[in-house]
Every structure is written in structure tokens, then in C-alpha cells.
């Protein structure tokens, strides 16, 4: 019995050590208020997006929940208004898997909202399949939809005294690469539709987030807009909702034991959105509320510029 108890204590100690050293992450503490400012958070009907939107609403911001699912988004609006006491929280339809939907959202926003201070490109997924425009799902949603959305809203962001774009990437960008020949032939960064291909596509799309942020910062130099990308931590959210049954059986117990909750996962997003004095670090990558290094490919300015030019062409902007 004593041996078994010792083993259990050891396992518990190891779990606590791993959890707090690798997964728990830092906490962002700030009293900054956002009264009179407007923020867009994509994918904010659940998970870290919803938690991010709630925090911004509590600080007094006008918060736009840019989401695909109307029913879930309206439920999130109700929850956030109730908990924050802020009535200026509203839903606007955005399906990042459709470039037309992105354009419609931008048009509606620009017609109805006079200012934009924060654009938080939070939505992301791991999934196979194709977008409405025929792109691989992860590439189309995680990168291309947010790329187009940002460019369409850039002039409104520039009108604010100080505004920020925050792109939620992931540590898995380190496993990513960008094959432009594959993009030209397959409209995707992978060739298949298996679960492994979906995982690889996710990694590639997260590298695209890093590269997009880097090139965006270069192009915004001298303006009032800065941008940042981040790894939110290992989060127990609905990002794996498109996984197969076997994968979920393996993934869910692990996520419950080790992964951050949505509140913990939102901390670095909030840091990048609200921390004072970050302007000289525009274009950089953060994790656990601190500056971090990216992969070698993530520092490749030529690759970032080419991805921008190709993305413009794929979105019909050039």
C-alpha cells in the first residue's frame, strides 16, 4: 500500500509540476479601460474568443462578436452582456470559409461602425474539407479569411489614434511550412484529407499567421496601427470539434488533465491587445504574456512578403 501511495503521490507531483510549468501560463493584469473604443473578435461565441470578448466588454469596449453560427453567437452576446453589464456587445455574421462573407461583413461593419480600435483574429480550426472558394479549410479559415478581413478594415483601423491587430497563432507554427507550388495546384498546403493532413494543414496555417503578422508590421510602419501574433497556450476548447471519434477519445481526457481553460488561454491575447508600450515590438510573437522567438521560417522576410503577394492574388485583391 505504501508503495502504491508513493507512486500516486509521485504522479500527482509530476502532474502539478508539468501543469504549472508548461501549461498554466501567465496572467495578464491591467486596469486599462476601453470606454468609447470598438473591438472585433472573430470566433468569439465559445472558448478563448468568448473569454476575450467578455474581458473587453468588462473594460467598457463596444465588442463585435464576428461568428458563423448565429444561434451560438446570440447566446454568447446574452451571456457577455449579462456578466459584464455592458449592453454594447453585438453579433455580426462572419463565415471565414467564404471570402464573400468576409467582404459582406467588412461592408456591413464599415457602414454601421464609425471606429475600430482592436481587431482580434482569434477564430481557428483543425479540419479537412474545402472552403466555399475551394481552398483547404485550415488555410482558408485560419489564414486567408483573416488576411482579407484585416486588409478590408485597415483604413478604419488607421483612423484610430492607436489601434492593434492581434493574430492568434500557435506554437505548432514551428512544424509548418509554405509550399507555393502546392498552393497553385491544390489551393492548399497539403495534398490529402486524412486526419494527419488536417493536422499538418493546421501547422502550416499557423506559420502563415506568423508570416502575415511580420509582413503586416513592415507595411504598417509609420502608421498608428501595430500588430502582434501569439501562442495562447495549450487550450481545452472546441478547436478539435471536427476530429474523429477515436481522436476525441484520446484527446479529451488529456485536455481535461493538462490543458488551460479558456480564461487562461485568453491571457496572452489580452496582453497583446492591451499591454502598454508594446508598439516597438510590432510584428513580433508572444506566449505566456512575454516576447518569444519564432521558427526560422517565421523570421523569413522574403517568405512573408511572397505569402502576402500570393494571398492578395488568391483573395482577388491584385
Image (spheres, helix red, strand yellow):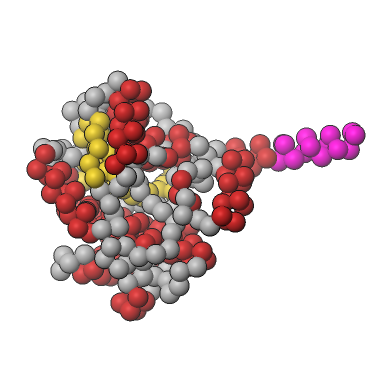
Residue 1 seen by the camera? yes
Residue 155 in picture, x, y percent from top left: 13, 49
Left or right of 238 on screen, residue 43 = left
Residue lying at 31% horizontally and 52% vertically, measured from the top left:
283
Q: Nearer the viewer, residue 35 or 262?
A: 262
Residue 133 in picture, x, y percent from top left: 26, 65
**Residue 201: quarter of image:** bottom left
Q: Main secondary structure of the magenta part?
A: helix
Q: Nearer the viewer, residue 232 or 303?
A: 232
Q: Is 8 covered by the magenta stretch?
A: yes
Relative to 168, say whether 172 is above or below.
below
Residue lying at 35% horizontally and 48% vertically, measured from the top left:
123
Residue 20 in picture, x, y percent from top left: 60, 37
Stretch in magenta: 1-14
Q: Is 267 covered by the magenta stretch?
A: no
Residue lying at 19% horizontally and 58% vertically, measured from the top left:
100
Q: Quadrant of the N terminus?
A: top right
Left or right of 129 on screen, residue 172 = right
Relative to 1, say whether 225 is above or below.
below
Q: Nearer the viewer, residue 79 or 167?
A: 79
Q: Quadrant of the C terminus?
A: bottom left
Amino acid at each position: 500500500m505504501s508503495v502504491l501511495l508513493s507512486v500516486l503521490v509521485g504522479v500527482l507531483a509530476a502532474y502539478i509540476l508539468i501543469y504549472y510549468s508548461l501549461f498554466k501560463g501567465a496572467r495578464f493584469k491591467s486596469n486599462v479601460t476601453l470606454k468609447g473604443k470598438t473591438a472585433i473578435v472573430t470566433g468569439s461565441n465559445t472558448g478563448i474568443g468568448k473569454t476575450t470578448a467578455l474581458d473587453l466588454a468588462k473594460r467598457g469596449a463596444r465588442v463585435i462578436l464576428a461568428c458563423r453560427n448565429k444561434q451560438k453567437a446570440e447566446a454568447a452576446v446574452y451571456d457577455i452582456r449579462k456578466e459584464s453589464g455592458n449592453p454594447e456587445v453585438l453579433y455580426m455574421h462572419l463565415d471565414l470559409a467564404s471570402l464573400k462573407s468576409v467582404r459582406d461583413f467588412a461592408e456591413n461593419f464599415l457602414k454601421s461602425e464609425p471606429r475600430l480600435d482592436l481587431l482580434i483574429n482569434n477564430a481557428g480550426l483543425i479540419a479537412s474539407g474545402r472552403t466555399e472558394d475551394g481552398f483547404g479549410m485550415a488555410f482558408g479559415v485560419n489564414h486567408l479569411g483573416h488576411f482579407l478581413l484585416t486588409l478590408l478594415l485597415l483604413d478604419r483601423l488607421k483612423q484610430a489614434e492607436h489601434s492593434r491587430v492581434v493574430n492568434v497563432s500557435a506554437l505548432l507554427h514551428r512544424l509548418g511550412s509554405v509550399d507555393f507550388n502546392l498552393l497553385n495546384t491544390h489551393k492548399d498546403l497539403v495534398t490529402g484529407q486524412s486526419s494527419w493532413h488536417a493536422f499538418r494543414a493546421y501547422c502550416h496555417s499557423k506559420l502563415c499567421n506568423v508570416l502575415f503578422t511580420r509582413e503586416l508590421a513592415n507595411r504598417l510602419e509609420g502608421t498608428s496601427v501595430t500588430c502582434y501574433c501569439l501562442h495562447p497556450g495549450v487550450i481545452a476548447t472546441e478547436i478539435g470539434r471536427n476530429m474523429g471519434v477515436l481522436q476525441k477519445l484520446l484527446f479529451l481526457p488529456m485536455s481535461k488533465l493538462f490543458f488551460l481553460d479558456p480564461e487562461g488561454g485568453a491571457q496572452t491575447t489580452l496582453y497583446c491587445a492591451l499591454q502598454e508600450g508594446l508598439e516597438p515590438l510590432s510584428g513580433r510573437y508572444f506566449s505566456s504574456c512575454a516576447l518569444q522567438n519564432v521558427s526560422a521560417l517565421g523570421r523569413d522576410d522574403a517568405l512573408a512578403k511572397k505569402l502576402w503577394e500570393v494571398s492578395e492574388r488568391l483573395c482577388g485583391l491584385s
